[in-house]
Image (spheres, grey):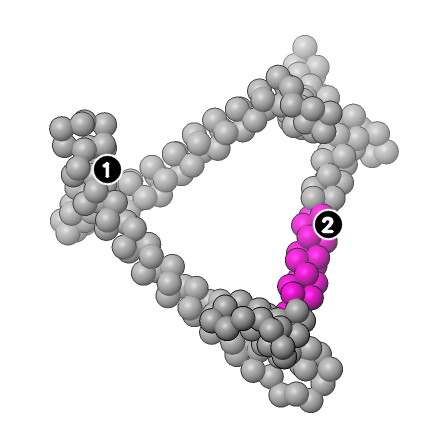
């Protein structure tokens, strides 16, 4: 009996079942897809709750507070508890204090990250010497695209011609991103088919 339950067909059956249930959406929306969708959402929520509870609340708040005596963290814990004030109508306004702090700090951190991780590197990679066809295409494409999003003047005459060229570069970029997305989805499909045929059904292994 133990060999039966330890066989790959039985042991991997839940994974195969939910894989087929998710791909059943290719036919149409159905109860099997909804079941797999709800199970996935529930498992994800439970996993992230446990992950955040242990990695943030326990390791970054409770242990430093109780073992290391870092009482300054009590202010962070108090702000976190204020978020639950939304469930009490009379004091729901107190949760806005925590939300304001979270939104402000998140906006500041994200701005710095985007500035140093995305904007400045992209600008440095755009200011290229015009000594090759690729560099010329990059510089012209970026300038034409920026001009397309310049709405302070009507896109007529030479400005309109450059803006039209910017539309062409934007379409090429969208096409490249779409092709990359299709390739990624096909790669996922190949991985799932390999799991069903090789790992689960043991066909061709």
Describe residue 31's horizontal placement relative to residue 194 as left or right: left
Q: Which of 21 and 67 is in front in this view?
A: 21
Residue found farthest to the right: 204
The magenta segment: 166-184
Identify the disc placed on residue 110. none
Alpha carbon separation for disc pair 1 and 2: 42 Å
Q: Residues within 10 Å of mark 2 (few under 14, many from 20)?
A: few
Describe residue 189's horizontal placement relative to residue 74 as left or right: right
Q: Identify the main secondary structure in magenta.
A: helix
Residue 6 showing in the rendered view: no
Label pair 1/2, CB-CB below 8 angstroms: no
Q: Nearer the viewer, residue 25 or 19?
A: 25
Residue 75 showing in the rendered view: yes
* Magenta residue check for 189: no
Read off the residue under disc 2: 183
Task: Label 1: state its secondary structure.
Answer: helix
* Magenta residue check for 173: yes
Q: Residue at x 18, y 27 (%)?
A: 89
**Residue 74 in which image quadrant:** top left
Read off the residue under disc 1: 83
**Residue 172 in which image quadrant:** bottom right
Q: Position of residue 45 (x, y in %)?
A: 44, 31
The correct choice, above or below, for 131 with respect to 41 in the image is below
Q: Position of residue 96 (x, y in %)?
A: 21, 42
Q: Which residue is drawn at 24% across and 49% down?
A: 100
Task: Label 2: state its secondary structure.
Answer: helix
The correct choice, above or below, for 163 with respect to 187 in the image is below
Q: Nearer the viewer, residue 64 or 170?
A: 170
């Amino acid at each position: 009996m133990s060999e039966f339950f330890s066989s790959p067909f039985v042991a991997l059956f839940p994974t195969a079942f939910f894989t087929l249930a998710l791909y059943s959406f290719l036919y149409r929306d159905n109860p099997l897809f909804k079941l797999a969708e709800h199970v996935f959402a529930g498992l994800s929520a439970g996993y992230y709750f446990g992950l955040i509870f242990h990695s943030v609340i326990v390791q970054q708040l409770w242990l430093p507070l109780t073992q290391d005596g870092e009482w300054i963290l009590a202010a962070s814990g108090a702000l976190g508890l204020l978020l639950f004030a939304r469930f009490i109508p009379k004091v729901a306004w107190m949760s806005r204090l925590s939300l304001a702090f979270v939104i402000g700090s998140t906006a500041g951190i994200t701005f710095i990250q985007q500035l140093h991780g995305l904007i400045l590197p992209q600008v440095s990679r755009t200011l290229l010497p015009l000594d090759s066809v690729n560099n010329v295409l990059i510089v012209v494409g970026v300038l034409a695209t920026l001009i397309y999003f310049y709405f302070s003047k009507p896109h007529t005459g030479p400005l309109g011609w450059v803006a039209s060229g910017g539309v062409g570069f934007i379409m090429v970029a969208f096409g490249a991103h779409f092709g990359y997305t299709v390739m990624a989805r096909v790669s996922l499909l190949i991985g799932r088919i390999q799991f069903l045929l090789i790992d689960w059904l043991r066909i061709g292994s």
